[in-house]
Image (cartoon, rainbow, N blue to C red):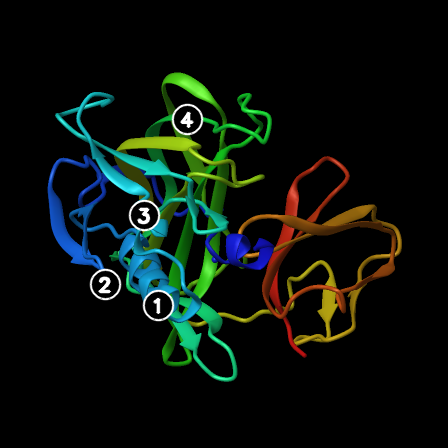
Amino acid sequence: MKRIFILFLSLTAYATSFGQTITGGDMEAWRYTSAGTTAPVSVEAPTGWYGVDSIIIGLGQSFGALLGTSPSDWRRNLFKEFTITHGGFFSAKVMTVIQDTLILPGVLTTAQTHIGITFLPTPGITGISFTGGNAVNVKPTTVSAWVQYFPGKDSTGATGIDSGMLNVQALAMIGGKDSVIGIGTIVIPPTSSWIQVTANILYALDSTHAIDTMRISFTSSSRRGLDSSTLYVDDVTMTSVANPDNSSVSVISNNDVIRVYPNPVSGVLYFDGPSNANISVTLCSLTGQVVATRTMTGSDAIDVSVLPSGLYFYTAFDSAGNSLQRGKITVAR
C-alpha cells in the first residue's frame, strides 16, 4: 500500500520575469469520457489536464474480475466543482479516496500518466511513467494556484493531519530525450478560504539548456493519505524568463567551487572543496525532499547506497546561506 501511495505523489535570473496563464488553468472548460468495462463510470477532467480516474477504475475493474472485488470498489477522485470557486464558474475538486483496500490520493496533472502492469505470475503494477505536459518556449520560474484544502478523517473519525502538494518539473531536451532539470514543490496546508500558493522552480545547474516542457501536478494527500482529504484548485498561472539561446552545459566547470564525484554513483558520493571555506551541501530528490545534508571544510562524503535509483539535485551554500553551486547526480545500481 505504501509503495502504491508513493507512486502517485512521481534559480535562475536572465531578464525580468513576466506572468503567463496556463492552458486550462482557469478550470472553466472540461472534457468527459468513461472508464471501466465491467461497470462503466463517467469521468471528467479540465481541458489540458488529466486525472488518474480512468487508470484506477479501468485497472481496478480488470483486476477485480480476477480477485473477486466489486466494480463499485473503484471510484473517481477528480470532480468539476460548481459551488467552491475562486474565479469564473468552476474549480477542480481533487479527493483522496479509498479504492478497495487502498487509500489513494487524487491527482490533477498536465502530464499523461501510464501504468505498467503484469498478470504473471501474479497481477501487479510494474511502474508508473509520464509523458507530455505544457509545451513552453520560455524558462518557467514559478507556478502559482489558488487553493482550498480540507484534511480527511483519521481512524477515530476525527479530522486528521494531512496536506496537499503542488509539484512542478521543467524539462529540456538532452541527448535526444526530455530530461528533468528543474523542480518546484510546495506543501498545501489546511485552509477553509482561498489562498494563493507558489512553487519556485529550482534549476539544478546554471544551465543554458532551453526548457521545452513543464509538468504541473496537484495531489490531495502528501503526508498520511486520509480518506476524503479534499483539495480545490483554481486559476493556475506561471512566471518565466526568456530561454537561453544555446544548449551547451557542463556539469563540472572550471568555476565550480566544489568537486562532486563519482557521477553516476552507487555507493559513496564525495565532495571536495576549499580547505579554508565552511560550505554546506543539500541533496534533494526530484520531488524536492531533502535526503541528506553536510557541512564541510575541505572534503566530505554522503552514503547514497540507501537511496532509490534516480536523479537527485545538490546545492552548495556558503556560511551566509548564499548559493555557490548547483548540480545533479544520478544514483544507479
For label 3, count other residues whose C-alpha is less than 10 Å away and answer few (under 14), some (14-19) or many (20+): some
Q: Secondary structure at mark 1?
A: helix
Q: CA distance from mark 2 to mark 4?
A: 33 Å
Indicate the amino acid at tag 3: Arg
Nearer to us in this view, 22 or 242: 22
Q: CA distance from mark 1 to mark 3?
A: 16 Å
User: Which is more N-terminal, label 2 or label 1?
Assistant: 2
Indicate the amino acid at tag 2: Thr
List x then y, in percent, for residue 213: 31, 60
Label 4 belongs to which residue?
149
Nearer to us in this view, 235 or 281: 235
Indicate the amino acid at tag 4: Tyr
User: Which is more N-terminal, label 3 or label 4?
Assistant: 3
User: Which is more N-terminal, label 1 or label 4?
Assistant: 1
For label 4, count other residues whose C-alpha is less than 10 Å away and answer few (under 14), some (14-19) or many (20+): many
In the picture, measured across the screen, residue 188 lies left or right of residue 81, that is right
Q: CA distance from mark 1 to mark 2?
A: 8 Å
Label 1 belongs to which residue?
65
List x then y, in percent, for residue 25: 22, 39
Q: Is residue 39 visible?
A: yes
> Is label 2 or label 4 in front?
2
In the picture, measured across the screen, residue 281 lies left or right of residue 55, that is right
Label 2 belongs to which residue?
38
- Assign the C terminus to one quadrant of the image: bottom right
* Residue positioned 65% across, 66% down in the render: 308
In the picture, measured across the screen, residue 120 lies left or right of residue 308, that is left
Label 3 belongs to which residue?
75
User: Which is more N-terminal, label 3 or label 2?
Assistant: 2
Q: CA distance from mark 4 to mark 3?
A: 20 Å
Nearer to us in this view, 77 or 271: 77
